[in-house]
Amino acid sequence: MKPITTLLFILVSIFSIAQDNETYAYYCVPCNSGCDAKQFEKPGTCDHCGMALEKMTVKEREMQMNEQMTIAFYLQNGVEVLDFAGPLEVFAYAGYNVFTVSKTSDPIISQGILKIIPDYSIENAPNADILAFFGGNSNVASSDEDVINWVKSQEDIQYHFSVCTGAFILAESQLLDGKTVTTFHSALDNLRNNYPKAKVLDDVRFVDNGKVITTAGISAGIDGALHLVAKLNSLAEAKWIAYHMEYDKWQPGEGLILSDDNPYTTNLDEELKVFEGTYEMDDNLKATIRVNGKNSSLIALVNGKKFPLFQNGKNEFMTVGREMITFKWNDSEVIGYNSEENKFYQKLE
């Protein structure tokens, strides 16, 4: 009887694991915090980081955590706060795994105010998918042979990203040779004169060469980071992050894009008026959807409150709760929309 009992125990265990993997729960967007491992029973926001919760199975969550894009932020002593803090905010909301690197593991001071303890030195930093560099005393890094050799030695880097005078570190590493680039407004001539193999542009928010993205100074790093999220995730995701950060000055695509993977090539909001109308919702609520003429987007009016909808495709939109809805058609008119659970909500008028 013992072998049969053992077999039954194994089968029950396997069945339980399979059930657990298919059980739905709610999770916050990965934010490299303790709440990444926390499950929630209902939709809403995380009580730790405040991020909107997403519904997924245990297996889907494991895959999401394993597939995180990894970004190394190289920070030198004197680095500009907003140069790195702005993109850090964007990439954290996108669910990327960000870590900091400096020449040593000793604390550094940002703008003479903020003390930063790097996660790693150039001697022990792990591999990353993206290397990012920032302005503020960047000559400390660009003139350091050990740092430049470290940059050159990094393998399998998918993207190089710089903000402000962080471009000088890329230039010294010969990563800007033959590229069109930009940097901080007062450093443009310096970059142009010292690195003639790069084409340096004035008056541009960012330049995307495909695998190398350089931005202008300070706040422009936020624009460049949102652009990278639009490339890697989706334009809807980038718009949601800008909304969540209350960065309402962002104009998607306000840069020079020389790559083929341009997330703004399709005029998605060309015919948004076809989606206008009043729609069913749960709990006997109604949503009145209108075009927001201010920025050519959709807003949903629910109980007197406005909620933006972020377009991800011709008929697909992301809600502020990060749920995807898909509008459905009957011949030439919209008749309603489907939720992520494929539940249909009718257009009432």
Image (tube, rainbow, N blue to C red):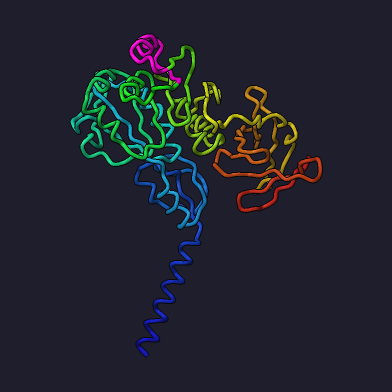
- The picture quadrant where one finds residue 140 is top left
Q: Which quadrant is home to the C terminus?
A: top right
* Residue under the point 59% across and 40% down: 318
**Residue 25, visible in the rendered structure:** yes
Quarter assignment of residue 12:
bottom left
Residue at the spot x=37%, y=90% of the render?
1
Q: Is residue 349 left or right of residue 21?
A: right
User: Percent position (x, y) of residue 335?
Assistant: 76, 44
Above-or-below relation of 21 to 146: below
Can residue 217 be seen in the rendering of this structure? Answer: no
111 up-or-down from 29: above or below:
above
Is residue 186 one of those drawn in magenta?
yes
Name the spot of residue 274 as percent of width and height, x first: 75, 34
Write down the quadrant of residue 287 in the picture.
Answer: top right
Identify the residue shown where x is 73% and y is 39%: 278
Side of 296 relative to 190 (left or right): right
Decide which of 300, 70 is in the foreground and name it.
70
Q: Is residue 275 magenta?
A: no
Question: Which of 173 and 106 lies nearest the eye of the viewer?
Answer: 173
Which residue appears at 41% of the width and 40% of the height? 96
Q: Which residues are magenta?
A: 180-198
